[in-house]
Image (cartoon, rainbow, N blue to C red):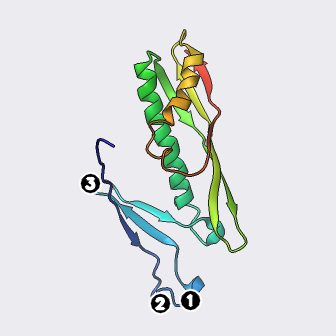
Amino acid sequence: MDKSHDFTARILWTGDRGEGTRRYRGYDRTWRIVTPGKPPVECSNDPALGGDPAKPNPEDLLLSSLASCHMLWYLHLASNAGIAVRAYEDTPLGIGEVGARGEGRFVRAVLRPKITVERGADLAKANALHEEVHEYCFIARSVNFPIGYEASYLEV
C-alpha cells in the first residue's frame, strides 16, 4: 500500500435508564455516532433485538456504507469512461443469517442501482463498471461476503 488513511469516530451509548445494564430489559439499545466536524447520528439496535425502528442500526449502516461507496466509485469510473450519469438511486439488499447462539452475519449483499445516463451511452460499458468498482471500493474490499449487482438503466 502506498498511502495510509485513518478514520475515527466516537461512539456514545445513550441508553442508560438509570440502572445501567443491571437488567437485560432495563436499558435502551441506543447510541450516538460522533465524527469530527459532522452532525451526530442517533442509532439503535435492530427492532427484533429491542431497538428503536426509527433509528438506523449497525446492519443499516453497513449496507448503506457499502452501497454509498459503490456509488461514489461508480460515478468516478463512469466519468473517466465518458459515461454521463444524470441520476443514481440504489435499494441495496443485505441477506443475513442468525446462528443457534444468536450470532449473526451477512452472507451476501445485492446492490440494485437504477442509473440514468445520457442517451447514446455505452450501456455494456456502463454495466461492466460495477465489477470494476469492487477493485477500488474501500468498504467492498473490506467485507467477507459476496456482493452482487443488479443494475438497471434509463437513457435521457
Q: Residue 59: which numbered mark, if any? A: none
Res 64 seen here: yes
Instruction: Look at 51% across and 37% down and name the residue there.
Output: 134
Above or below residue 137? Residue 104 is below
Instruction: Look at 51% across and 45% down and name the residue there.
Output: 66
Residue at the spot of label 2 = 19
Q: Residues within 10 Å of mark 1 (few under 14, many from 20)?
A: few
Q: Secondary structure at mark 2?
A: loop
Quarter of the picture containing the N terminus is top left
Q: CA distance from mark 3 to mark 2?
A: 32 Å
Which residue lies most toward the top here? 120
Above or below residue 153? Residue 102 is below
Residue 92 rendering spot, x and y as whole percentages: 60, 43
Residue at the spot of label 3 = 37
Instruction: Look at 30% across and 53% down and name the residue there.
Output: 6
Tell me which amino acid carries mark 3: Gly
Tell me which amino acid carries mark 2: Glu
Which one is nearer the viewer's eye here, 49 or 77?
77
Which residue lies most toward the left here? 37
Residue 9 rendering spot, x and y as whole percentages: 34, 61
Q: Are marks 1 and 2 in contact (CB under 8 Å)?
A: yes
